[in-house]
Amino acid sequence: MGQCYGKTNSTNRTDATNVTIVASSTDHNHQAPLPSSTPRNGVRSVKNTPASPLPGGVSPSPARASTPRRFLRRPFPRLRLQKHIAASLVKRLGGRGKPKEGPIPEHGGVEEEQQQEQSLDKSFGYSKNFGAKYELGKEIGRGHFGHTCSARVKKGELKDEAVAVKIISKAKVLLICSFQFDS
Ligand SMILES: Nc1ncnc2c1ncn2[C@@H]1O[C@H](COP(=O)(O)OP(=O)(O)OP(=O)(O)O)[C@@H](O)[C@H]1O
């Protein structure tokens, strides 16, 4: 049994009045004898003394001695957008890296909305005529970033096949994008 002390303990030893114990075992059977050069009543720090061998030739735990310290450089993997979405957002934000600071106006005037319609690129890498290609069905589930609906393909290779369409809110896409720019 051993106990660790992190502060000066002057009550354990009667012959040395000012002993600084940083980390040691109080089990005196396991302590190595003090070297003869150690001053009897001087200050002695055991901070850098080598670990004493255990009795009976028992070696200390190999896990403690050989396990290297590992520091994680990045605790979580970085969020990555698909390339075409990231490129579209970079184009929209003008490569500035961060969205404009300040509150986002909730309800602008009609003129303001029309101006935004003209200036905003809403393609996001997908065709605008989604309704022409898919017939949207019922909602089948929800995730963190949006909801998923069943749909039927109207034309193309997958014509008449049932597919799942995930609808992600643009606000959340922009939030993910700002994470990527910040890191
Ligand atoms: N191809 C699919 N077929 C059937 N059901 C689906 C399909 N894709 C999604 N779903 C249903 O929609 C639910 C939500 O799907 P979604 O992909 O949005 O979940 P998520 O991966 O947890 O979301 P997020 O990535 O936003 O956290 C699923 O739990 C599942 O029930």
Image (tube, rainbow, N blue to C red):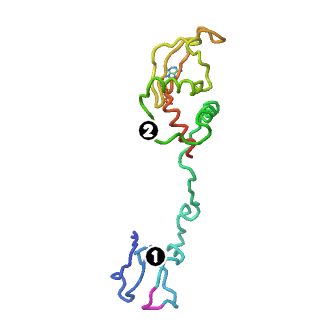
> In the rendered image, which quarter is residue 83 located in?
top right
Rendered position, 41 above or below 49: below
Q: Residue at x 37, y 84 (%)?
A: 13
- Looking at the rendered structure, the kind of residue marked 2 is Pro
Tag 1 residue: 30
Which mark identifies residue 121? Answer: none
Q: Quadrant of the N terminus?
A: bottom left
Residue 37 within the segment the image draws in magenta: no
Specify start and end residues of the magenta stretch as a single range: 39-43
In x, y percent, where is residue 60? 53, 67
> In the rendered image, which quarter is residue 126 located in?
top right
In x, y percent, where is residue 43? 44, 87
Tag 2 residue: 103
In x, y percent, where is residue 5? 39, 72
Q: Nearer the viewer, residue 15 or 28?
A: 15
- Looking at the rendered structure, the kind of residue marked 1 is His
